[in-house]
Amino acid sequence: MSVSGRVAFVTGASQGIGRACALKLAANGSIVAAAARNQEKLQDLVNEITAAGGKAVPCVLDVSDEEQVKVSIKAVVAQFGKIDILVNNAGITRDQLIMRMKRADWDAVLTTNLTSAYLCTQQVSVSMLKQRYGRIINIASVFGQMGQAGQSNYSASKAGLIGLTMAIARELGSRNITCNAVAPGFIETAMTEVLGAEFKESAAKQIPLGRVGSPADVANAVAFLASDEASYITGHVLNVNGGMLMG
């Protein structure tokens, strides 16, 4: 699954799934532009990639800020001449029952999880259209497919990403640009660390494979969709959930 010589822009790269994606793509030969708000964590990631013989640069930005997105993506294109792979991974949660959810928490989740993907896709598509090549991969969620109580904002944002994926796949397919989504199930990340051990054990029992997933499980799927081996796959949602949701 070589992506040698490709330039990848990964959002939410400072931790969890985004970090694993950046590491995997770099290990497979990509130059990685790692984007997130936390400069220290990004630098640690870049240092790790560089120490392993890869190449990466940090992009400190808030993906919900349109101007920051424009500036950062233009800077990466200016430095490397192109962006071949976009991984829209940045995401947050602000959980609450719908009757108690504040508008600010709804807006924050939709803006970070969904609007940022639109902003980043819009900007990288300019480069991809010129070169007639691109791989756009959106990190959705099993909860965007089946819903989750207390996560109406998160579920809506991830369902929106799936719809965005299919629309972009239809729009850009004729230019050899694919757009796919990966829908993780229960993954062990900083976002799930706050959940108790009892909840995690209960969740694992509902998964046919009998375990929660790791960020590397998701990164492996992303690396495949980013590769030339996946050149005839577009508009697809690849489930990485241990069998939590089938069909």
Image (cartoon, rainbow, N blue to C red):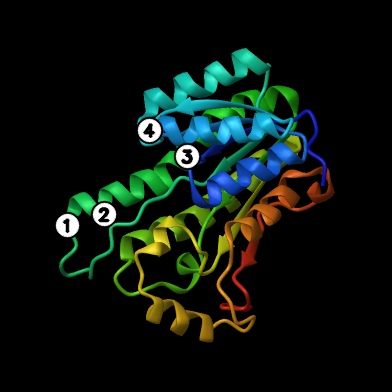
Q: Earlier in the sequence, mark 4 or mark 1?
A: 4
Instruction: Quote the CA–CA distance across marks 4 and 1.
Output: 22 Å
Q: Residues within 10 Å of mark 2 (few under 14, many from 20)?
A: many
Which amino acid type is shown beneath numbered disc 4?
Asp
Figure disc tally:
4
Q: Tell me if 12 is positioned left or right of 9 in this view.
A: left
Can you tell which quarter of the image residue 154 is in? bottom left
Give the numbered dot on residue 118. 3
Element under label 4? loop
Which amino acid type is shown beneath numbered disc 2?
Trp
Which amino acid type is shown beneath numbered disc 3?
Tyr
Residue in the foreground of this view, choosing between 205 and 154: 205
Give the numbered dot on residue 62. 4
Q: Earlier in the sequence, mark 3 or mark 2?
A: 2
Element under label 1? loop
Q: Residue at x 32, y 60 (%)?
A: 153
Pointer 1 with pointer 3, Cβ within 8 A = no
Instruction: Quote the CA–CA distance across marks 1 and 3.
Output: 24 Å
Instruction: Quote the CA–CA distance across marks 3 and 4.
Output: 14 Å
Element under label 3? helix
Instruction: Quote the CA–CA distance across marks 2 and 4.
Output: 17 Å
At which x and y percent is residue 244?
A: 56, 78
